Amino acid sequence: MKGKKQMAVSSGRTNVIPIQLDATFFFERAVRSLDRYHYDRALKYFRRAVEYEPDNPVNHCNMAGILSELGNYEESNKILKWVVDELDPTMTECHFYMANNFANMENYEAAEDALVQYLEEDAEGQFLDEAEEMMDLLHFELERPPRRANIKSREGLYEHDQARMLLEEGKFAEAVRILRSITEKQPEFTAARNNLALAYYYMGLFDEAMATVQTVLEQEPGNLHALCNLAIFYQHEQDTERLELLVQSLRKTVPFHQEHVFKLATTMGILGEHDHAFVHLQRLLKDADNQQDPCLLHYAAVSACNSDKRGEAERLWKQALKLDRESGIPEYYLKHLQDGVLPPSVSYQYHLPFEEQFKKWGKDTDDLPDQVKKDPLVRSSFFWALRHGDRSTKLQVIQALGMIADNEVKETLKDFLMEAGEEDYLKHIAMFVLRGIGVTEPLQAVLEGKETTVEQNRMPSRLPVWHERWQAVVETALTRMQSRYDMIGQHDLLTLWVEFLSRLYPEVPPIRKTEGWAAALEYLTAKMHRRAVTYQEVATRYGVSVATASKYAKWIDEVCGIREKMQTVFPALDGIEQE
């Protein structure tokens, strides 16, 4: 029997499970003690965990948390400060814990310091809501407003909201500057990159737009906003093969969030997938709040109209008209639908067709309505047409931009001056507009294929000097012409005056009566633009005799050959009076 016992022992078999004493073991014991509210025991176990893993900041923070629960705030803060100062500076939440401890010790100044440091250093914002609540408490306890903090976890969000607002106002260049800054600091901020791509697109900068959206998709291949933007860019580039592959994928996409549904719906509409657009827009209109949005109703009406659901389109535009009678947009499309004169494909943009806008405002108008100036779709159509329209459209757009006359317009026209492929005449008009809206500094421009600087005179010329009396003639004419001539007419008058002076220089006649020369210039400009005018009319308007106006007009005509130029363009007409 004794031998059998010895054999059993020597076999090495046992039912005892060995205990592995390590940091994990003591951490689990500490958590179990916490669950039972045994804080003293939990503290003992956390101390042992620290002994096993002294370089693990989480163990130290847990120990500091128990000390705080036990009311030992000072010792807790010593540990937290050591962690964030020495062991792991990335544990920025320690500042929040310290702020709590200071507040419990009623040391509110120190609590404020720690809380501000947390807000300014913590990129994740894990305790952001709690920190803001504590700020309210400190406001009450300190009896003064708390110090302002630059909240790192919200870094870029305010700027992004500002950029989105600028995009909605059509101030694309300003939005680009802000969005570029955000994406440089936060490359992972995909929403900012998507909006940057759109801003480039609205400005007609397609290469930049494409590069930006590709960057987003490298980070997030399934980003719906980026995929929708990419599809629009493929359509612009007429890349039908890649577009069709992408559209096949978008057809199968059924987003959940309303923002994504709207993005996909409008994208499918622009791509000509009107049936798919209508389905998504109908989903949005099931929401009662969305039924009060005339813009959304317009999109739905357009998708219905473009997919031969004319009755549904009429119903939707009537509903939009009840909500928006001032803009004239639902009324315009409803009338044209009922008259049967809508084009085969109606634009999804919520504004009147570009040509209709100019017809409505009038080419000779002095100003545009404020709501037009601030309408981002109108502004984007202007910027788009300035880069991609025909010559006539560009002339109209430059004039319209002169009526808007804000910083965005100034920057856009300055950029236009540097476009090597644009016609010099258009650039001269743009410079004239810039001077007319208060831009006095020298302008950089590419003229005759060369980069040049145009000084403050209203028009560039090869004249070595520009006398005050010459300028006085221009100012006299433009002052009287402003309400009756568009920018192009005013520009052409100035061009004619510069040409006359340039051809005679240095034998330029003395300018004694500016009104006589101004009357002659307006008369000739009117004739060049096929406007009915007589010497008597301009003489009366400028307070000079018919003989003076006639004499100067004939002199300018002889030097510049206006009659010959007009007969080349209008061979059957002789536009200048013979008196």
Image (spheres, helix red, strand yellow):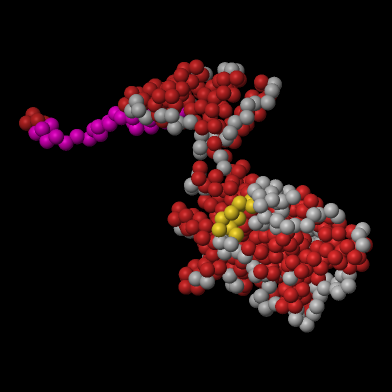
Residue farthest left in this picture: 3
Q: Is residue 578 above or below residue 285?
A: below
Residue 189 visible in the shown view:
yes
Q: Is residue 269 magenta?
A: no
Horizontal side, residue 86 vs residue 226: left or right: left
Q: Which residues are magenta?
A: 7-34
In terms of depth relative to the viewer, which is nearer, 529 or 265? 529
Task: Where is residue 369? Give x, y as percent.
Answer: 80, 57
Quadrant assignment, res 423: bottom right
Horizontal side, residue 213 vs residue 578: left or right: left
Quadrant assignment, res 568: bottom right
Q: Is residue 14 magenta?
A: yes
Residue 399 visible in the shown view:
no
Residue farthest front in this picture: 507
In terms of depth relative to the viewer, which is nearer, 377 or 561? 561
Q: Residue placed at 54% from the left, 38% from the top?
A: 153
Q: Residue placed at 57% from the left, 28% from the top?
A: 116
Report the quarter where the C terminus lies: bottom right
Task: Where is residue 383? Give x, y as percent.
Answer: 65, 60
Task: Where is residue 38? Give x, y as percent.
Answer: 45, 24
| Number of dots carrying numbers | 0
Horizontal side, residue 383 vs residue 241: left or right: right
Q: Is residue 17 above or below residue 568?
A: above
Task: Where is residue 542? Give x, y as percent.
Answer: 89, 59
Q: Residue placed at 75% from the left, 81% from the top?
A: 571
Q: Is residue 416 above or below residue 237?
A: above
Q: Residue placed at 61% from the left, 51% from the top?
A: 453
Report the quarter where the N terminus lies: top left
